[in-house]
């Protein structure tokens, strides 16, 4: 009967969990010497380590593996620039330095786009790929210099408020 189904609906509705309020985004990572060192070391690894992303790209440029360059640059922007550089950038304490970090992150994106474009079928150009690889190295190195600007006392004071 319709009365029975209405009763069943009412019972089911009464057991439904109440709507939950939206939660604010988790607090940002604390700015400590350990978190800053860890975040910037992850970026440093990509630049300097033989198994880091820059070395992988350099190897693909040297061997003229254009398909490999195209494939790698697509994934690397998200994995490296957005995730690793983004994490380190968020730990910077000075507003102007953070702005510079954003510009350097954007420059890394354009370096990767340039490498990708210089590797497309019919447009393969090793010299261009090498030029963008050099710019990528320089932009990451400049980004790493920003680590020394972190003011841990100011970060601790801001976190206490």
Image (spheres, grey):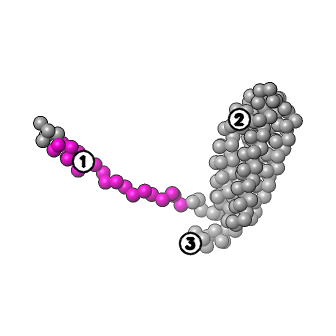
Q: Residues within 10 Å of mark 3 (few under 14, many from 20)?
A: few
Which residue ends up furthest to the right in the rendered image? 127
Along the horizontal axis of the image, is 155 left or right of 142?
left
Mark identifier at residue 160: 3
Q: Residues within 10 Å of mark 1 (few under 14, many from 20)?
A: few
| Quarter of image, res 56 | top right
Q: Residues within 10 Å of mark 2 (few under 14, many from 20)?
A: some
Contact flag, marks 3 and 1 (Cβ < 8 Å) = no
Earlier sequence position, callout 3 versus callout 1: 1
Classify mark 1: helix, strand or loop: helix
Q: Position of residue 40 (x, y in %)?
A: 71, 54
For the point 21% across and 43% down, the residue is 9
Q: Is residue 127 above or below residue 151?
A: above
Residue matched to label 1: 13
Q: CA distance from mark 3 to mark 1?
A: 44 Å
Classify mark 3: helix, strand or loop: helix
Q: Which residues are magenta?
A: 6-27
Contact flag, marks 1 and 2 (Cβ < 8 Å) = no
For the point 77% across and 26% down, the residue is 121
- In this view, the residue in front, 122 or 101, is 122
- In this view, the residue in front, 155 or 129, is 129
Q: Position of residue 126 (x, y in %)?
A: 85, 33
The stretch drawn in magenta includes residue 10 = yes
Q: Is residue 1 above or below residue 93?
A: above
Along the horizontal axis of the image, is 7 left or right of 46?
left
Residue matched to label 2: 72
């Amino acid at each position: 009967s319709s009365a029975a189904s209405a009763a069943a609906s009412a019972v089911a509705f009464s057991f439904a969990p109440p709507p939950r309020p939206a939660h604010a985004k988790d607090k940002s990572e604390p700015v400590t010497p350990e978190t800053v060192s860890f975040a910037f070391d992850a970026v440093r690894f990509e630049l300097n380590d033989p198994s880091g992303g820059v070395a992988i790209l350099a190897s693909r440029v040297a061997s003229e593996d254009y398909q490999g360059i195209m494939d790698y640059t697509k994934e690397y922007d998200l994995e490296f620039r957005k995730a690793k550089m983004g994490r380190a950038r968020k730990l910077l304490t000075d507003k102007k330095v953070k702005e510079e970090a954003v510009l350097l992150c954007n420059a890394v994106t354009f370096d990767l786009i340039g490498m990708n474009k210089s590797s497309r079928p019919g447009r393969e150009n090793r010299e261009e790929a090498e030029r963008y690889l050099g710019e990528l190295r320089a932009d990451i190195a400049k980004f790493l210099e920003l680590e020394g600007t972190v003011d841990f006392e100011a970060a601790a004071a801001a976190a206490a408020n």
